[in-house]
Image (tube, grey):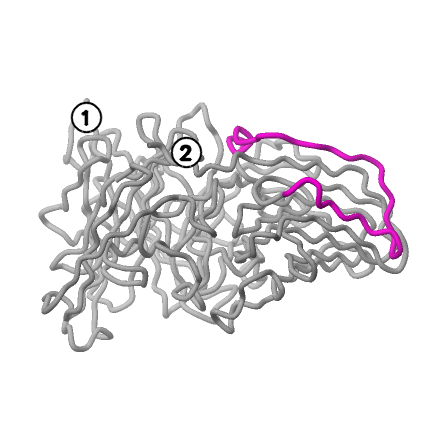
Amino acid sequence: MCKMRRFISLWLWISCWYGISAYAQVEIRATYREPFRPIYHFTPPVNWMNDPNGLVFNQGKYHLFYQYNPFGMEWGHMSWGHAVSRDLIHWENWPIAIPEGPEGMVFSGSAVVDSFNTSGLGSLTHPPIVAIYTSHHILDSLHPQVYTQSQHLAYSLDGGRTWKKYTHNPVLDLHMKDFRDPKVFWYAPHHVWIMAVSFPTQHQIHFFQSADLIHWQHTGSFGPAGDTTDVWECPDLFPLPVYDAAGRSTGKTKWVLMVSVQYNVQYFIGDFDGKTFRADDSSTILRVDDGPDFYAATTYNDLPASDPRRICIAWMDNWAYAAHIPTFPWRGFMTVPRVFHLQPNAKRKLRLYQYPVDEINRLAMDSITWHHRHIDATHPWQIDEYPFTCGKLSLHISHIHKRFQVIVAQHDSLGIWISYDARSGRLQVDRTHSGLTDFDHHFSTTATVDLLPQKELQLDIFLDKSSVEIFVNKGEKAITMLFFPRPEQTGISLQAWGGSCRIDSLKLIRFVQQKNMIP
């Protein structure tokens, strides 16, 4: 499965839910050189992918499971796809871990290393990896809107290569229609497992406790709160270190609850006592990422003590147009892995900060740096001699009189337009003229974030062929966007209006141009 040019056979079903009345066999070659295939972001070889699932570290490997349709490029037949990495950058595709079965589709969930064999599914010398997921069971194939959701287990005794569904599933069944996306983790102070699971239509996250991953007791709930405009999905609950305004550790810790709300991910900062979560502020809506293509974010379990990072990956797409994006033979991207911490922002409010993992810098191929350059309305700066489609652009601007703009993936009037108004503090990212946009009317969008008005700005822009992830002021804000450029969109342009500004530094690092899949 992991061979770069291997043919992959797919069965296209034309059927009712469990029966096949007709089928066709096609062969699709995943070359990893497709026009919009990213270099350092994970994509499946072929077919549909959405939410990351079961992020877990075990025996030197980062495991990435994900919602996957083995039979086509649209949502359906949800199973857990699987890839592993030793550095979060180079990925090896492994066989499907947990397939759809008679009990239903395999929806989102999490995975843990049961180091003490509390479940009894392995042994102390060979502890199991346990996956906890939602089974989506349609009661009548003619009425797919009639279903139940319950929480199931599967486990692996060989480091995640093969999986077995637990014989006595489900392990948690409330006989509900909407009850999904369990995030499970070990809570050391009480020596128990904790499950955070969503009641989507009630805008609540409920918490359960278990000694063995099999028998669960309800302990509390949170919500409704924050953004309740749509269903709540894919919760994650974790502690984070608190830094001071200068970026130094304070030695303090707070808990963060993340919840996906249809087209974005919100978060709450508060405390967790082993039974329930309480937010410091349950009314203010806080976004993990202010772009349109960041959803179902979740973080890694079981990182070693030598690595204290909280690492997050999200689905880099949007339900409004995910089925129509012009990629082939796959659909679906993952964001770059990011590290979280808490820090006061410029307004002295404690907020989530994030930045890509350092491992990405290993892809650096070459770089160039410019210093102390002034631009104004009559003297823009165009960089065409250094084609840029994959890498990192770090930019520090000061003395911004009124407005500043940088355009990446630029050619003539096409590009990603990043504009900042120093008077209002408003930063906008516009992809309405970014290349191919007419495949869905929802796609042409502009993202906006409000910063403290000031005359300087720091941007770190990670470009990867068909995506841009922008980190503002060392991770105070993040904006994630897909775009589908023409081949000639390789330029960079910097402009100022209503006065001048100074480019204190601009560093351009280009990354290797070959897809980093392990052969």
Quarter of the figure that contains the N terminus = top left
Mark 2 is surrounded, within 10 Å at the Cα level, by few (under 14), some (14 to 19) or many (20 or more) other residues, namely: many
Residue 359 painted magenta:
yes
Q: Label 1 to label 2, Cα distance in Å?
A: 27 Å
Q: Position of residue 479 (x, y in %)?
A: 59, 53
* Mark toward the viewer: 1 or 2: 2
Side (left or right) of 168 relative to 38:
left
Q: Say which quarter of the image contains residue 159.
A: top left
Residue 1 painted magenta:
no
The magenta segment:
358-387
Q: Residue at x 34, y 64 (%)?
A: 199
Q: Which residue is mark 1?
A: 126
Residue type beneath disc 2: His
Q: Which residue is mark 2?
A: 90
Residue type beneath disc 1: His
Q: Position of residue 178 (x, y in %)?
A: 29, 67
Q: Say which quarter of the image contains residue 444.
A: bottom right
Secondary structure of the residue carrying tag 1 is loop
